[in-house]
Image (spheres, grey):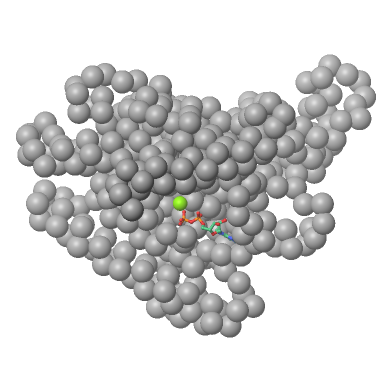
Amino acid sequence: MSDVDLVGTYRRISEVLRSAQRAAIEVENAPDKRKRLRTFSFHEAAALLGTKPRQITAFIKRLDHVETSARTRLTMEELLELRQSLHAGSGRLSALPWRRSELGEHLATVVFTNFKGGSAKTTSSVHFAQYLARVGYRVLLIDLDSQASATAQFGIDPSREVGLENSFAAWTMAREEGRDLPAASICQKTYWPSIDLVPGGAVLAQAEESLGRRSANGKVEDILYFDELTCFLNSVGDSYDIAVVDTRPDVNILMTIALHAATGLVVPTRATMTDLASTGEFFAHLASYVADFRDAFGSGLDTRFTKVMVTAYDPTDRSQEALVSLIRERFGDAVLPGEFLHSRILGTAGFGKETLYEYEPSTDRAAYNRVLASANGINQAIEQELQRVWGGGR
Ligand SMILES: Nc1ncnc2c1ncn2[C@@H]1O[C@H](COP(=O)(O)OP(=O)(O)O)[C@@H](O)[C@H]1O
Ligand SMILES: [Mg+2]
């Protein structure tokens, strides 16, 4: 096959697959071609807020200016309003757990990373972001993976809607060229009212090249290229409590800058021998990177916690069970408590599919509740690590 044929063949395959992705996203987004978040029952809202459903009813009646109401559901925006009003009334931090910068609670950054593709980094980071939003935090999700599955999960088509101007590449290019770019300009709203997204896409290759040029040229002003994500996060202002970063599965500069920005690292892994072997290689890489960095710069990284997370776990599989008990015995609290259970809801392939926090079961509630509880448990354990870092009696 000549080169010309090759180019044509590759383009055709790419176009077919891109339009398949586009079609899947559009179906998911119909009728207004945008993904929407479902509403929540008063029962769910009451559980999230630690109040009684009748308190929710009273709030909705006030909101709608009516004496009686047949409503049984509310939107995430309304839930947020209710949080604000409960917090204003009681001062209860759990109603609105926003960080208190006056007490030194800085924006915390959780990076999901591992060498292994398919270890549920994207699934875990998106679920963690949505868990945080549901319990009342303001979240910025940063997609640093050029495959952009987290971006697609939020109903944005990476091949058509993400370019140099609206991804993290915009930031790195502006910095390389010495231009000012307001960090907030690349944080876009999503259909989750408390989650903003810095989308990813193939264009992130340009961010890598730009950072690569700076790492290679050795000029004094460029030597700190590895702090670019930290700089970006320092510039987004006070609008967020927690940044969640999804990364690409290999050693690359974007992953390195994420390590430098991390308050905490979460390393998702499946409980199989191949995944654990790859996770072992990943920790060997981390060890040598941190040691080399310390030798070169005289200081280490300011990562406050590093946790392995067992994902897509099937407790009926004896070999997975044996591996999990082995790693728990050896690693102790370096492994997050509980496992994120395998779920058929997540296992079905397709762009734009729902997360556990978006899905509402019509059948087999018990199975759904089990996986949801597993995701909540593990996400809450990460939240508690962040609260420990923040301190101040949380
Ligand atoms: N808990 C789970 N149960 C079932 N399938 C899962 C689970 N977590 C992840 N998956 C599936 O595994 C595949 C890889 O997950 P993904 O999050 O994209 O991994 P990564 O980002 O590490 O490459 C996806 O198809 C995803 O839906
Ligand atoms: Mg991924």
Residue at 40% over, 46% down: 10
From the top left corner, tell me how far across and down residue 108 is, in percent: 40, 41
Residue 93 visible: no
Q: How many marks?
A: 0
Along the horizontal axis of the image, is 260 left or right of 359?
A: left
Residue pictured at 38% horizontal, 59% vertical: 114
Q: Is residue 293 above or below residue 366?
A: above
**Residue drawn at 32 percent across, 56 percent down:** 250
Residue 249: x and y, percent? Answer: 37, 55
Query: Considering depth in this image, is 286 or 217 the residue closer to the camera?
Result: 217
Question: In the rendering, at what x and y percent does residue 137 appear?
Answer: 54, 37
The answer, for residue 126, to whether it is visible in the render is yes
Q: Quadrant of residue 187?
A: top left
User: Residue at 26% across / 67% down in the picture?
Assistant: 284
Q: Is residue 316 above or below residue 123?
A: below
- The residue lying toward the viewer, choosing from 366 and 58, is 366
Q: Is residue 335 left or right of residue 64?
A: left
Q: Report x, y in % for residue 116.
A: 39, 62
Say which quarter of the image contains residue 217. Answer: top left
Q: Horizontally, is 234 left or right of 16 in the view?
A: left
Left/right placement of residue 339 relative to residue 296 reads right
> 151 and 12: which one is in front?
12
Q: Quadrant of residue 87?
A: top right
Residue at the front extreme, as displayed: 1
